[in-house]
Image (cartoon, coloured by chain):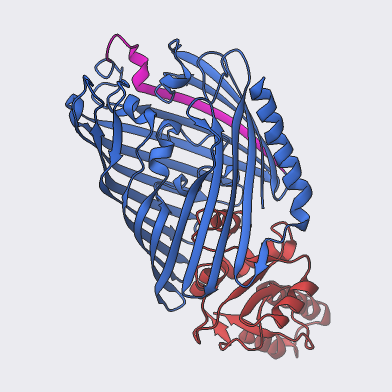
Amino acid sequence: MSNNRSARVGLAGILLALTCAPVVAVDLGAGVQFHGFVSQGLIHTSDNNFGGTSDDGIATDARELGVNLSWRPNPDWLLSGQVLSRWAGETDEGGPRIDYAFVERALFNDGAHQISLSLGKIKNPYGFFNTTRDVAHTRPGILLPQSIYMERMRDFFLAAPGVALRGEHDSGDHYLGWQVGGMKMQADNDELNYVFLPVNTGGRFEGRASWLAQGLAELDGARWRAGLSFGDVAMDYRPRARDPIPAGVARMRPLLLSLQHNRESWTFTAELARVEVISQPIAYQAYSEGAYIQATWRPALEWSVWLRREGMHFNVDDKAGRRYTVRGQETYRGRTHATVLGVRHDFTPDLALSAEWHRIEGVGMLSPQDNPDGFTKDWDMVLLQAAYRF
Amino acid sequence: MTPAWMSAVRIRGFLPGVLRGGLLLVLLGLTGLAAAVDVVAHRGVSVGAISLASARALFGMRQVKWPDGAQVRVFVLADGHPVHAAFCKEKLNLYPYQLRQSWDRLVFSGLAQAPTEVASEEELIARVAATPGAIGYVRKVRPHDPVKLLDVQ
């Protein structure tokens, strides 16, 4: 009931945005710009819940709504902030929050080379898609590849207060961009307990000083793009009173290789990650891995079709997921393999409708919070999404 | 471009008229393609030519400052406009969808502002002429257009 009501609110939001958009001045003058996005998804799964009560039903509380303001008072300064509301099953219930808010100062700018310093809550660069993962129009499908961009880890890995140094260099037909940031992740998220412990006994994680870096090269007019993202992200586990799990440090050291080839009607994208996961409280150390390859075909300006194959293992030494499991949990909890087929139609340059079908083996991408009654190993998922941005 | 025209003039004397006409048509077609889109700027902009790297940085919303320190203002046509598609391919060596993806990534992560989209080439000329630091593009600048033609090298 409340789901249906909130779905109606979401759709009403899209319609409202559509109606208002022509009169909303995006450029407010004096160097101020206003942008936003809204999407409403419907999810049905044959088994297991994803993004709400999707099993044998339709989850309607998959919704994203964001607005941002930016102000460039002069060429050397930029102030940017975005507020985001997001609904996704039990793990996200729509409370508005600051997605990013930072000030950027240009340190060097001679036309083809820019270096700048940012301070505030900054999006974490990770792969091709992490910084704008909640903006439907920037994703290569309805859902980002869960093998690399797990929804379960989203909140934790999305953005963090800190400082970043960023450089961009254009040379003829080529481009090089890089970013190095120091931050403290916002780790007050129940889902982390399931990922790092992996049971929730009521303790909390708290961010420690961490760093992330990314380099991105574009060759031949960005027909070829290659990126490398890596870093060291740490947090402290603070047990609650009489917590059976002791205090300790949990750590992730990701290494992600991103490749893309762009042609007029085709885009081929592949990303491959290897992440060292250390959880001192339960004396656990392992490498997790994830990869996907996607082909996207654009037969016309307003149509695209894509096919993706992806896979993820929490522990590369245990691909069947046997040792990862604790307390009698099923073995396929440690992995996800999927084939994804999708189509998108852009009704206007700013309004897109998409449909996606997933054939999935394993449940590594699923949240135990959405699935209190357990999991089914082989399952299908169908998603529909309407998305608008301005 | 110039050598092609000169050779056309040189051969005019001895080729039969039909062939000569055809050759001239081909040459006109080639030069027409090569100069299909003109990059224009506000008359106060301090440069007369920009490099390909600079053109990509300017329209990629990365370069926000002219060499004299003035703020850059970028005006563009809609993604589906034929002049936009021609501009992306000929002047930036990009497909329009790549430029759009790049703008979206920057705008929704707060790293840059979006270009200003206008409805027609006439409006683009008018906005560029009226906005200090402005840059844009049109199919062909006319002699009386109150803007500056920028050569992309």
Vertical position of residue A134 compared to residue A364: above or below: below
Asked whether, in this view, residue A80 is left or right of residue A239, the answer is right
Residue A221 is at least partly visible in this image: no
Q: Is residue A332 magenta?
A: yes
Q: Residue furthest front?
A: A241
Q: Nearer the viewer, residue A344 or A51?
A: A51
Q: Is residue A109 magenta?
A: no
Q: Nearer the viewer, residue A286 or A104?
A: A104
On the image, the x and y values in percent for residue A133 come to: 50, 43
Q: Residue placed at 27% from the left, 25% from the top?
A: A197
- In the rendered picture, chain B carries what hue? red
Q: Residue placed at 43% from the left, 38% from the top?
A: A155
Q: Nearer the viewer, residue A181 or B52?
A: A181
- Report the magenta residues as a range: A326-346
On the image, the x and y values in percent for residue B113 come to: 57, 64
On the image, the x and y values in percent for residue A82 come to: 53, 52
Asked whether, in this view, residue A292 is left or right of residue B145, the answer is left
Q: Can you tell which quarter of the image residue A141 is in?
A: top right
Q: Residue placed at 26% from the left, 21% from the top?
A: A318
Residue B20 is at least partly visible in this image: yes
Chain in blue, by letter, is A
Vertical position of residue B67 compared to residue A291: above or below: below
Vertical position of residue B11 compared to residue A118: above or below: below
On the image, the x and y values in percent for residue B86 come to: 68, 65
Asked whether, in this view, residue A262 is left or right of residue A349, the answer is left
- In the rendered image, which quarter contains the N terminus of chain A? top right
